[in-house]
Amino acid sequence: MKSEARVVVIGGGVVGASVLYHLTKAGWKDVLLIERGELTCGSTWHAAGGMHTLNGDPNVARLQQYTINLYKELEEISGQSCGLHMPGGIMLAGTRERFDWLKMAKARGRYLGMQLELISADEAARVFPIIDKRHFVGALLDPIEGHVDPYGVTHAYAKAAQIGGAQVVRHTRVTDLKARGDGSWDVITEAGNVHAEHVVNAGGLWAREVGRMVGLELPILAMQHQYLITEDLPALKGQKELLTCIDFEGEIYTRQERGGVLLGTYERAGVPWSPLQTPWDFTQSLLPEDLDRIAPSLEVGFQHFPALGEVGIRKVVNGPFTFAPDGNPLVGPVRGLRNFWVACGVMAGFSQGGGVGLALSQWMVEGDPGADVWAMDVARYGDWATLAYTNAKVRENYSRRFRIRFPNEELAAARPLRTTPVYERLQAEHAVFGDYCGLEHPLWFAASAAQATEDITFHRSNAHPQVAAECQAVREAAGLLEISNYGKFEVTGPGTEEWLSYVMANRVPRVGRIALTPMLNERGKLIGDFTLCRLSAQRVFLICTYAAEEYYRRWFERHAPPPGVTVRPCAMEYVGLSVAGPRSRALLQGLVREDLSGAAFPFLSFRPLDVGMIPALVGRISFTGDLGYEIWVTTEYQRALYDLLVGAGAEQGLKLFGGRALNTMRIEKSFGTWAREYRPIYGPYEAGLGRFVDLKKGEFIGRAAALEERDSGGALRLVTFTVDASDADASGDEPIWHDGKVVGWVTSGAYGHSVRQSLALGYVPAALTNETSGFEIEIIGERRKALRQPVALFDPDGTRMRA
Ligand SMILES: Cc1cc2nc3c(=O)[nH]c(=O)nc-3n(C[C@H](O)[C@H](O)[C@H](O)COP(=O)(O)OP(=O)(O)OC[C@H]3O[C@@H](n4cnc5c(N)ncnc54)[C@H](O)[C@@H]3O)c2cc1C
C-alpha cells in the first residue's frame, strides 16, 4: 500500500467504489480505497439490487436518474457486467388516496422528463399478471426501473476507477484517523499509515465508527431488513421478465429472481441492528431470519399475489443497512473538520450511489457539488440529532417507507424533544405543533383541546377555517406568533462590516437598521437569505433559516472572518415572539418608553428596547408583509414577554397565529423562503432578489456571476400565480404547464385567506415572464387554470409594512 495519497476513501461498498470512480473521472488520479474485507462485504453484497427514480425530493430524483443511466457506461469502461435488468416497474395503489399520491408522483415526474403512466387495476393485472386485481384501484408504470447485481456494480466502479488511476487495497482496516495541522490526515491502518490530503468516510455499516475516530457522532442507524426468494413460479416460465413492483398497502416490493420472485418488506415492527456499536467482525455476514416479524406483510402479500402462496420459499435473507433520520443520504464536507468528507447513510445504494459519488467528487474537486444536494447534505443535521433521536426517527422512517406522507402531515417520533419556554402556554391555547429540527413550534390554533389534531389530507384540512381566522386577525387587528425557530448568529469585532460585506450580497446596514440579503456561492447561486440587524459598528445580529445553521456555519468556516471577528451561532439563546397587524404598533407602544411612530421607528429599524421590564432586541419587520415587530429575548424572559403581550393585546384584538397562517400571508406577499424558493439552483435575479444585491459595494462572493445574471436576466423567473382550485391547494413540486407543455414547477402554495384565492409560487422560463394566461398547475392529477400575477396579491406597494 502506498504511504501518500491525495484522497483515501474508507470503505469498498457500492458507495465508496462510486466515490472512487467519480474522483478519477473528475481528474483526481492519486486516490486510494481501503477496504477491511472484500469489496461489498458490508451491506452491499446481500442487497436486492432494485433501483428506481422516484424520490420525495426532485433533486435527489435527478441524482437517481443519473445513477441508473450510468450503468451502461460503467460496463463499457470496466468490462464488468452490472447484471443490469430493466423490465420497468409498477407501483400498485390499493386505495383512492394512494392513487391520488401516484397522480402527484406522476405530475412531479413530468418536469424530470420521466415517462410515467397511470393505469387501471385491469390494465395492471394485464401487465403484471401475478396480482389479484380486486385489491387495487390503479397503478403507475415507470419504464426506467429494474435491478442490478450488487457485486457486479461495485466491482465495475472499482475496476473503472483503477483504469482511471485509482488503487484499491483490501483486507486492511482503518483503525484511526489523526488530523495534521495543515488539514491533511494520517490514516492509520492495520498495514501501516497513509498520509492523505482528504479522507472520505464511506464506511456504510461502520460509518458511525469511522466518524467516532474523528469525534463525530453521525446520525445513522442500521435496520434489519428481510427479503425472501420463492421457488420457481410455473406462470413465469417462458414469459418476459416481470416488472419490478411496489405494493404500498402490503409494504412490499418484488422483482423476478430467476424463475421465482424476490419479495422484501418494510414492516411496521422494524428492528434496529447494533444500535450502539457495529461489530468489526461482521464481515459478509447475515442475521438469523425472522419470518414472524414480517408475517403481517406476508399475509397481505399472499392475498395480493396469490401465485406466491402456491410455491415454497427457497431462501430468506436478513441483513442490516443504514439510514439517516429522514432516509436520505448524508453527503458532503463536515463542519469543523478540514478535508473530511462523508458519503454514508445511503439506504438505496443502487439508485443513489452514482449520484452520491458524482456530487461528492465535484464538491471535492470543484468546491461545489454541482447540483442542489440540500436534501442529502450532512449539514442538515445538528447536535440535536443524537443517537437516541436517530434511533426513534429511523425506526419511524423505516416503518413508513411505503406509507403516504401527506403535505400537511407531522410525524410523531422523538417528540416533543425541544421546547421553548412558552410551549405549555401555547399548548393551553390548543396549539397544533410542528417539528422543526426537533423543536416544537405552533402551526395553528384549534378551537378546543379536543379539536387540536389535524386531519392529514391532500385537500384542505380542518385547520383551514382556523387559519383563516388567524390571518384575518393579523390583517385586521393584531396577531402574535412564536418565532424562536429562526436561525441566529451574532457577528462581532473590528472588521465585522468588511467580512459580512464580502460573504453577503447586499450592503451591511447602518447602525439601528435592518437589511435583507441573499448569500451567494461562487457560481452566483443562492445559498441563503439573511436578515442583517446592525446593533453597533462592531455587532451585527443575523437572522436566517434554522435548518440551515450547520450549512451556514460550514460556509462561514470556509470563508473564515479575519482574526478579531467572531461569528457565533446563537439560535436557541434568543427566542422570539412577533406581533403583526395594523394594531401591533399600538399594542407595543403601550409597553415601551421609546416612540414607535413611523417617523421615529420606521420600517427596517432594529434596536435594543425594554418591553415592560424585559430587555429585548426589537426589529420593525414581519414576514407577514404587514406592519409588525420581531422581538428577541434571551430564553428566561420569553414567558414574561408572552404574558405581557397577550395581556396588553386583549384590547387590540390580538390573536395567536401559527406557521400555517404565516406561510399563506408570505405567499400573498410573494415572499420566498429558504429551501423552497431559494436554493442553490437559482440565482438572485431569477428569484426576484436582485434588489438585494449591491453590485456597487465592491467585491463579494458570487459578484461576477451575479453581474452576469443581471445582464443576461437568468434562465428562470420566480412568479406568483392565482390558481383555479377550490378543494386542494398546491403545496410544492407540482408541474406548471403553459400551452399544453410542462414549463416549470411550483415551489410553495397555499390558500390566501386575505385575498380569497388559491396561490402558488414557482419557477418558469424567463421567456414566459410576461405571459399571464395559458398557465395551468397540476394539483392531484388535475390541471387547474392558473393566472400569473405581475405583482404580489396583497398590498403590492408595501404600504402596510411601511406604515
Ligand atoms: C436485505 C437488503 C436488501 C437491500 N436491497 C436494496 C435494493 O434493492 N436496492 C438498493 O438500492 N439498496 C438495497 N439495500 C441497501 C444497500 O445494500 C445499501 O444502500 C448499500 O449497500 C450501501 O452501501 P455502502 O457502500 O454505503 O455500505 P457498505 O456496503 O456497508 O460498505 C461499507 C464498506 O466499508 C468498509 N469499511 C467500514 N469501515 C472500514 C474501516 N474502518 N476500514 C476499512 N474498511 C471499512 C466495510 O467493510 C464495507 O465494505 C439493501 C440492503 C439490505 C440489507
Image: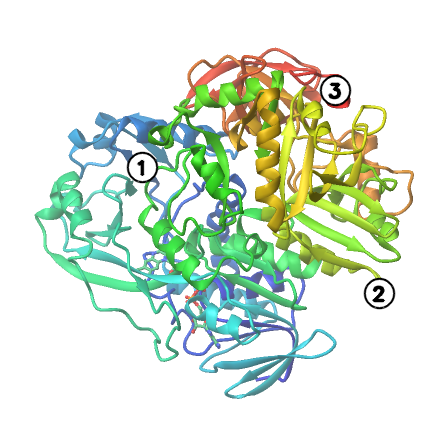
Neighbours of disc 1 within 10 Å: few (<14), some (14-19), many (20+): many
Whether 795 is drawn above or below 630: the answer is: above
Question: Nearest the camera: 581 or 268?
Answer: 581
Q: Please indicate whether residue 178 sits to the left or right of residue 285 in the image.
A: right
Q: Tell me, yes or no, if residue 373 can be seen here.
A: no
Which callout, 3 or 1, points at the residue further toward the start of the chain? 1
What kind of residue is marked 2?
Answer: Pro
Question: Nearest the camera: 245 or 531?
Answer: 531
* Residue 216 rendering spot, x and y as whole percentages: 55, 69
Which callout, 1 or 2, points at the residue further toward the start of the chain? 1
Q: Which numbered mark, 3 or 1, is in the foreground of this view?
A: 3
Residue 563: numbered disc: 2
Which callout, 3 or 2, points at the residue further toward the start of the chain? 2
Residue 104: numbered disc: none
What kind of residue is marked 3?
Answer: Gly
Q: Are marks 3 and 1 in contact (CB under 8 Å)?
A: no
Q: Are marks 3 and 2 in contact (CB under 8 Å)?
A: no
Q: Please indicate whether residue 96 sits to the left or right of residue 705 in the image.
A: left
- Secondary element type, mark 2: loop
Residue 798: numbered disc: 3
- Secondary element type, mark 3: loop
Question: Nearest the camera: 471 or 188?
Answer: 471
Neighbours of disc 2 within 10 Å: few (<14), some (14-19), many (20+): few
